[in-house]
Each structure stands twice: as C-alpha cells, then as structure tokens.
Image: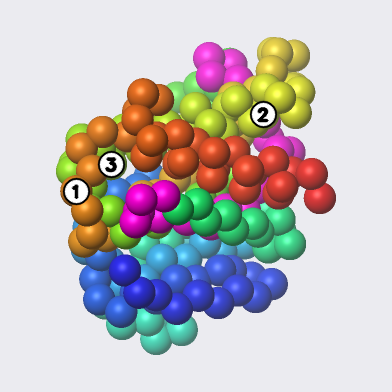
C-alpha cells in the first residue's frame, strides 16, 4: 500500500496510489468501498453555526473533496477537534505493519449507555465527531477481520480513556468514547490475516498503536 499524506489546519488527507478497500463509519462513503482518498476535516463544534438551514454533513464533505479535485471515491469524516491533536503511530512485526492516523478531543465524552442527547429515532444531529481514526495495514484482511479490527480499536480507545480517567458529564462515570466518534480500517494486499482479536499478534499491535496514538493526542 503506497500513499501520499498531507495535513493543514483544516484537515489531514491520504491519497492512495490505487483504490484500496476501506470499511468505516464515515459520513461520506461509509460502509465498505474501494477508495482513492481519505480525509478527516475540522468543522465548528456547533456544525449548524450561522446557517439558516442544516446542511447534511455528507454534502459538506463532498463539497470539500470537489474543491480539492480529489478524483475517485473519497471517504470523509468530520471532527470538532483541532488538527494540532493529530497523532500518527506505526508498529511493525514479521513483515506486517499497522499505522494509525488520529485526531481527538473529549469535550463531548460519553459512556456507552448514557442518556442520549437526541431522544427521537433518526433525529438530525448537529454534533460532530471528536475521536476519529483511520487504521492502515499492508495485510490483506478478510471481511470478518476488518470488523474485528474496528472492535479492537474501540476497546483500545476505551481502555485509554479509562486510564486517563476521562469522565462522562452525563453519568459521571468513566467515558468509553465521545458522542460521535468515527473509525476506518484500510486493507492492503500483503499477507492474509483472518484474526485480529486479543489472542493474536495482529490484534496486540493494532490495540497498542491506537492506544499510543490516542494517549499522545490527549496528553497535549
């Protein structure tokens, strides 16, 4: 997997030499797709701001991609976190590498199961993501292992918040994330990996990379 990386005050961006398989909870082209670009952009904490009408986040992200003339499918996330929170960690073993790109902030920290801010199904939500990450690997991941990667990354994130004693203002308990986190995993074409859990080396490296990146980001 070869890519170009750039970052500025507004976003960080990855451009891949050829389309790669990405599974994500991203607003723009989330789910599973073959993508040529990924970016994570900063927006105001109150996304609606001074607009008279709520612009759908996917529309805003697509407009950014079009302005930058990114050709091909683009996967996009948005966050209220500053790009100064960006951290990048790469771990490697036995010819397989895992690299995490992450931004973070915990102003809307929440614990899983907290009372929701929006109490109607499919209600428009103006709040935006705060802990966003994409995980790249040169390994070729099976569909089930990509899901397991997202599970592992989420557990590592929660472990880090627990160790840093980040508290949810809703319940007063230790937070497990923020209200609108987003995660992506990008698979390469190298050695095949079918298992990414806590019993295997790949899962260990992935969790350590996420933990290290998030801890460094939050300890600014």
In the image shown, does 191 or 127 lie closer to the viewer? Answer: 191
Image depth: mark 2 or mark 1 in front? 1
Label located before the other in sequence (1 or 3): 3
- The answer to whether mark 1 and mark 3 are in CB contact below 8 A is no
Residue 187, image x, y percentages: 28, 55
Secondary structure found at label 3: helix
- Residue appearing at x 76%, y 23% in the figure: 165
Q: CA distance from mark 3 to mark 2?
A: 23 Å
Query: Mark on residue 192?
Result: 1
Label located before the other in sequence (3 or 2): 3
The answer to whether 79 is drawn above or below residue 70 in the figure is: above
Label located before the other in sequence (2 or 1): 2
Find disc 2 in the rendering and name its residue: 161
Image depth: mark 1 or mark 3 in front? 1
In the image shown, does 200 or 88 lie closer to the viewer? Answer: 200
Q: Which residues are magenta?
A: 93-114
Residue 82: image quadrant is bottom right
- Residue appearing at x 38%, y 35% in the figure: 201
Query: Mark on residue 160?
Result: none
- The answer to whether residue 156 is left or right of residue 194 is right
Find disc 3 in the rendering and name its residue: 146
């Amino acid at each position: 997997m070869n890519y170009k990386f750039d970052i500025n005050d507004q976003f960080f961006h990855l451009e891949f030499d050829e389309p790669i398989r990405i599974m994500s909870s991203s607003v723009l082209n989330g789910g599973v797709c073959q993508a040529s670009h990924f970016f994570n952009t900063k927006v105001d904490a109150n996304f609606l701001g001074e607009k008279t009408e709520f612009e759908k986040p996917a529309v805003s992200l697509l407009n950014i991609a079009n302005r930058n003339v990114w050709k091909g499918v683009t996967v996009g996330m948005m966050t209220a976190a500053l790009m100064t929170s960006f951290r990048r960690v790469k771990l490697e073993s036995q010819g397989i590498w895992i690299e995490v790109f992450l931004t973070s902030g915990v102003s809307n920290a929440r614990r899983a199961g907290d009372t929701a801010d929006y109490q109607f199904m499919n209600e428009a939500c103006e709040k935006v993501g705060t802990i966003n990450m994409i995980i790249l690997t040169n390994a070729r991941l099976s569909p089930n292992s990509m899901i397991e990667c997202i599970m592992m990354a989420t557990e590592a994130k929660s472990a880090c918040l627990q160790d840093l004693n980040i508290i949810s203002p809703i319940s007063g308990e230790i937070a497990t994330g923020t209200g609108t986190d987003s995660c992506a995993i990008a698979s390469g074409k190298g050695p095949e990996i079918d298992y990414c859990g806590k019993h295997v080396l790949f899962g260990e490296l992935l969790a350590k990379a996420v933990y290290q990146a998030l801890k460094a980001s939050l300890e600014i």
